[in-house]
Amino acid sequence: MESPNHPLKELFSQLGLASDIFSINEFIGAHSPLANSILLSEAPF
């Protein structure tokens, strides 16, 4: 059975994004905070 929890590194890799900790932190810093009125699935990034 597959674990329901996956590391962010795995998600970034699946999306074709750099998945090292520095790149993940850069992405989060550049795109947060997301306004409460915007669903994550509808974010422009």
Image (cartoon, rainbow, N blue to C red):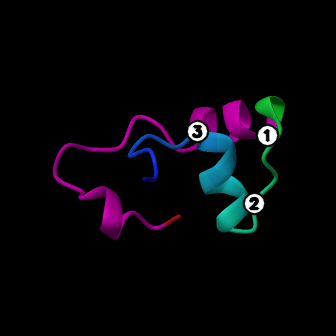
For residue 23, which numbered disc appears in the image? 1
Circle 1 SS class: helix
Q: Residue at x 32, y 57 (%)?
A: 40
Q: Is residue 20 left or right of residue 36?
A: right
Q: Which residue is mark 2?
A: 17
Tell me where residue 24 sits by quadrant. top right
Q: Amino acid under label 2?
A: Leu
Q: Position of residue 25 (x, y in %)?
A: 69, 30
Q: Is residue 13 left or right of residue 8?
A: right
For the residue pair 24 and 3, the one nearer the viewer reads as: 3
- Crowd around label 1: few <14 · some 14–19 · many ≥20 (10 Å): some
Is residue 36 covered in magenta?
Answer: yes
Q: Earlier in the sequence, mark 3 or mark 1?
A: 3
Q: Position of residue 11 (x, y in %)?
A: 60, 54
Circle 2 SS class: loop
For the residue pair 29 and 10, the one nearer the viewer reads as: 10
Q: Is residue 16 left or right of residue 40?
A: right
Q: Amino acid under label 1?
A: Ser
Front label number (3 vs 2): 3
Q: Amino acid under label 3?
A: Pro
